[in-house]
Image (cartoon, rainbow, N blue to C red):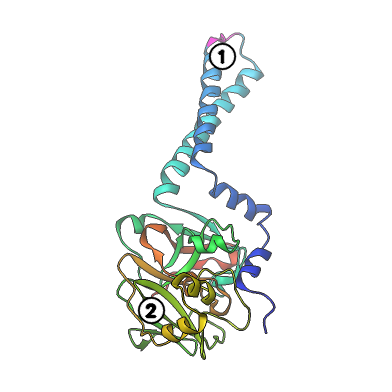
Amino acid sequence: MYPFSPIQLIAQVQPPAGFVGFVDKLSRTSISSMVYLVAFCTLLRIFYFIYLNKTSKYQRGITHSFLKVVNELMDAFVYAIVVVFLLIRPYIGQTFYIPSPSMVPTLKVHDILIGTKYPYIVDNPKRGDIIMFRPPSNAHDVGTDAIDFIKRAMGVPGDIIEIKDGLFYLNGKRIQEPYLNESLMNNDFRLVNYNGDYIPLKVDGSFVNIDHRYTLKEDKYYIETLAKKYGKSVEELTEELIKLPPVAIPDNYYLAVGDNRNWSFDSRAWGLVPREDIYARGEFIIWPPKRFKSVRQEVN
């Protein structure tokens, strides 16, 4: 029996501090804040420019030289802000801090990852991509305030994904996952269609969507909540769901699963990720330096 649920583990992760915390905060600074900063620096530059040009060359001293250097540095600073925060971050890429162990061993807690955005501006995610996306409302319902979710796209539109005895199957064929390094739990999984709703179905013997290592009662797809939604008893709904066959992932949706399969709060709990919520692809771990490497990995 495990003492913590994935949500409890997420809640225990402390905000980053030091250099990692500075990078994380900087990468999340709002564009509006940067615009205000640019406006303030521009006003200072105008003031310095007027002052420097009004001062005759016979009156120029240490103060004049100092302000001239400050003005030139501020000029470079403004250009850097414009390039990084108004061009690179919205359209090219940004850094992402890893706050939880859901992607271990590929990504460890406190890693800093570079994610690129331009690939998904011109194309769709590929199976095996590590994707950054806006957390589903279900995740916020259980108490996490994460700004980004980072998982692996294990299923793309048209895929039929199943987990049997902890092993992934794509369209009936087992797929290799070299990025995993631990024994997987035995819960089976499949996506089913129930009255037009696509439901992630975790099967444990005669139970569905109940993990006996912990009881995630807050999960929107927890069986009791489903039963209430459909006006059925838990027993009735369980009997109906467990008989349903797996279905293909619909257009414009993706199945996102953590590499740390035993301890990841992912699509197996809260469902599919809409395409419009996916905005970046993981590329390189850049911090700590000794872990610098590419995280690109195809899944076939």
- Highlighted magenta segment, given as a residue range: 54-58
Task: Specify whether residue 4 is in view.
Answer: yes
Residue density around tag 1, few if under 14, some if 14–19, many if 20 or more, within 10 Å: few
Residue under pointer 1:
51
Q: Rounded to the nearest whole Å, what is the CA distance between mark 2 and mark 1?
A: 71 Å
The mark tally for this picture is: 2
Who's the residue at 59% across and 51% down the image?
23
Residue under pointer 2:
192
Magenta-span inclusion, residue 132: no
Nearer to us in this view, 99 or 224: 224
Residue 141 to residue 296: above or below:
above
Q: In which quarter of the image is the N terminus?
A: bottom right
- The residue under label 1 is which amino acid type? Tyr
Who's the residue at 38% across and 72% down the image?
198
Q: In which quarter of the image is the C terminus?
A: bottom left
Who's the residue at 54% across and 75% down the image?
224
Residue 167 % position (x, y): 46, 87
Query: Residue 193's mark?
Result: none
Residue 184 % position (x, y): 54, 85
Residue at disc 2, secondary structure: strand
Position of 290 compared to 177: left or right?
Answer: right
